[in-house]
Image: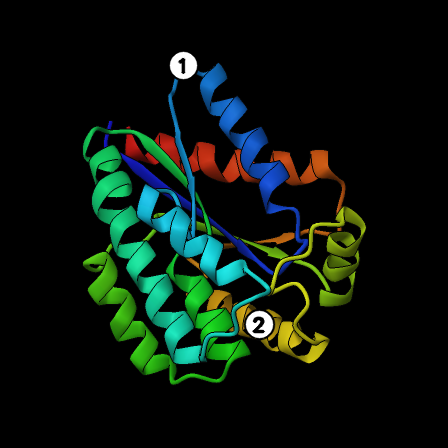
Amino acid sequence: MPGLFLTFEGGEGSGKSTQIERLAARLRSRGLDPVVTREPGGTPLGDRIRALLLDHAHRPRPETEAFLLEASRAELVAHVIRPALAAGRVVVCDRYDDSTLAYQGGGRGLDTDVLRAMNRFATGGLVPDLTFLFDVDPAVGLGRRAGAGDANRLDVEPEPFHRRVHDAYRALAGRDPARWVVVDAAGRPDAIEQAIAAAVESKLAAAR
């Protein structure tokens, strides 16, 4: 079976991590061995970049932030994602290049045409087979993150920033409905899990 590339996107506190764990467990129960990774990070160099980007002690310029993200992404695609797909495995990635369009484009106001070119350069044009958008009101998501007590540098950005990110994600999903599945992240976790499983099962069946 050819590899399958799945990405999970959404604002802070949208619940992606929980559903990624549930999906990975479902895939393993079927005898599949998914590669679960994340952005930024997923490689030794990428993890060091992640620490820099989320550290409250650093306030990089938006352009610097974008370049660091692309550097981490290039490493992840080259050393983790492409080899796994070539081996016929399912790759589940917590954020990918759409997050740059939403956060650095929508949130920071950088030129999205430039960001798209940077994404293509970093990924070699690799596009996910399916992308799940965890759609939740930013105030709800930020409230969840505040309750967790481990806020990073992005969590403490003002709410208007997170609303711009949210709107940018909605626009991205609206432009490519064949790839995006919009999930009501305020819904019951079990219902969200079932919706994701059904969409992934459909993709797996088509790939056979």
Q: Nearer the viewer, residue 116 or 190?
A: 116
One can see residue 175 in this view: no
Q: Amino acid at mark 1?
A: Gly
Residue 197 vertical placement versus 32 (above, below)? below
- Please state the horizontal and vertical placement of residue 204, each as a whole percent of the image: 37, 32
- Local packing at callout 2 (Cα closer than 10 Å; few below 14, some 14-19, many 20+) is many
Q: Nearer the viewer, mark 2 or mark 1?
A: 2
Question: Which scheme is used to colour this image of the protein?
Answer: rainbow
Q: Nearer the viewer, residue 151 or 198?
A: 151
Helix, strand or loop for disc 2: helix
Q: Nearer the viewer, residue 109 or 85?
A: 109
- Please state the horizontal and vertical placement of residue 89, each as a whole percent of the image: 30, 29
| Residue identifier under label 1 | 31
User: Which residue is most to the front?
Assistant: 57
Looking at the image, residue 151 sits to the left or right of residue 128; the answer is right
When asked about the image quadrant of residue 159, the answer is bottom right
One can see residue 144 in this view: yes
- Please state the horizontal and vertical placement of residue 20, each as a whole percent of the image: 54, 37
| Residue identifier under label 2 | 165
Residue 158 vertical placement versus 48 (above, below)? below
Helix, strand or loop for disc 1: loop
* Quadrant of the frame with the N terminus: top left
Instruction: Tell me, yes or no, whether the two marked residues, 2 and 1, touch with CB atoms within 8 Å.
Output: no
* Quadrant of the frame with the C terminus: top left
- Please state the horizontal and vertical placement of residue 26, each as a whole percent of the image: 52, 23
When asked about the image quadrant of residue 154, the answer is bottom right
Q: Amino acid at mark 2?
A: Val
